[in-house]
Amino acid sequence: MSEQSGSIDVLRSQIEEAGKLGLAQVEAAATSADLESARIHILGKKGTLSEVLKGLAQVPGPARPQVGAVANEWKSKIEAAIAVKKEALEQAAMDAAIAHERIDVSVPSRRNHLGGLHPITQATRLVISILSRIGFEVATGPEAETDFLNFEAVNIPKDHPARDMQDTFFLGPGVVLRTHTTPVQMRTLMERPLPLRILSPGAVYRCDSDATHSPMFHQIEGLWVDRGIRMSDLKGVLDFLAKELFGSKAKIRLRPSYFPFVEPGAEVDVSCTICEGKNARCTMCKGTGWLEILGAGMVHPELYRAARVNAEGVTGFAFGMGVERIAMLLHGIPDLRLMFQGDLRFLRQFP
Ligand code: PHE
């Protein structure tokens, strides 16, 4: 009996010793990894406390629950200590992170570089949006165009001197890179019923290149055919366009001119957007007070004939402008070539 109680005491003190040692290990853990290895070392399958408890099998029946209770007490003490330590370590880790990983929310964020529309596209869309408010619709056509539609049908026959004016790129027999978007007017005359009120924007090509000419550039042409359309309607539409584009002070003037596809024809100027005609040394208008922006006129009867449309009782006007020129005037861009160089320092000025 006394021998038995002796071995129970030994076991009990072994448990106490393993428990105390275990608690000290938990206390000493400096990181969560330390803590986890302490837990395994004490409570794991082959842990110190578990090993001691294997001796429990030798304890005779009646004393076993007592010793077991002591063991369980130590086990829960250690588990509780682990939980407390775990929280303390996590809190410390969080504090360290907050101290080091400071985020200054007042620092400006990095600029998001969104692409922008090219100033030519912007100017094209601007003109279209202005004129669509008074009923113009967009019509398009191919850039490789037949000689017939680019020239013949719009009253520029083979021997006509105006062909030289246009400096054409020839693609093959009977096919050219269109030199203006006037052939789109022909296409719509041929395809759509009257009345017509269209805008034809797009790239055009002429064999010419310097500070004011590019071999590829963009036009927007307008065509309005209906009963009773007169030159004064043309003037009204262009005056509206000029004021919407350049401001309510903008004025226009028409000077008689020649284009084979209109009669009468005119060149149209807008009052200088820079000096408003007040500076004799203005570099924009060269002191004239006027800037040429487009060509226009009343549709030549020959075009209706070529399109085989019955134009009895209808009349129409047409106008055409260079989009680059409009964009240059809108933004004060000094050299046409800037438009085609793709230099981001230039393009970023037109967000
Ligand atoms: N097609 C002419 C050009 O390219 C512009 C224009 C269009 C002139 C319509 C008059 C009427 O220069």
Image: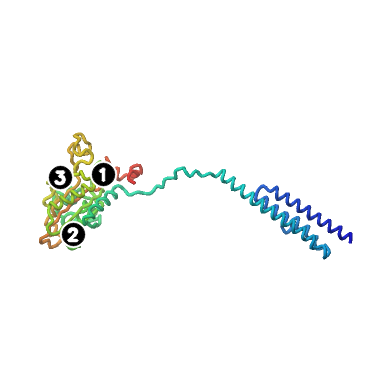
Q: Contact, CB < 8 Å: mark 3 with mark 2?
A: no
The residue beneath circle 2 is 196
Q: Is residue 315 left or right of residue 62?
A: left
Three-letter amino acid code at the position of disc 3: Arg
Quadrant in which residue 303 is drawn: bottom left
Quadrant in which residue 342 is drawn: top left
Three-letter amino acid code at the position of disc 1: Leu
* Residue 105 visible in the snapshot: yes
The residue at 80%/61% (across/down) is 66
Three-letter amino acid code at the position of disc 2: Leu
Quick check: is the Cβ at mark 1 less than 8 Å away from ligand 1?
Answer: no
Most extreme residue toward the right, as rendered? 2
Dot 1 falls on a residue whose secondary structure is helix
In three-dimensional space, the C-alpha distance between marks 3 and 2, rounded to whole angstroms, equals: 25 Å
In front: 8, or 220?
A: 8
Graded by Cα atoms within 10 Å as few (under 14), some (14 to 19) or many (20 or more), the crowding at tag 2 reads some
Q: Residue 330: which numbered mark, if any? A: 1
Graded by Cα atoms within 10 Å as few (under 14), some (14 to 19) or many (20 or more), the crowding at tag 1 reads some
The residue beneath circle 3 is 253
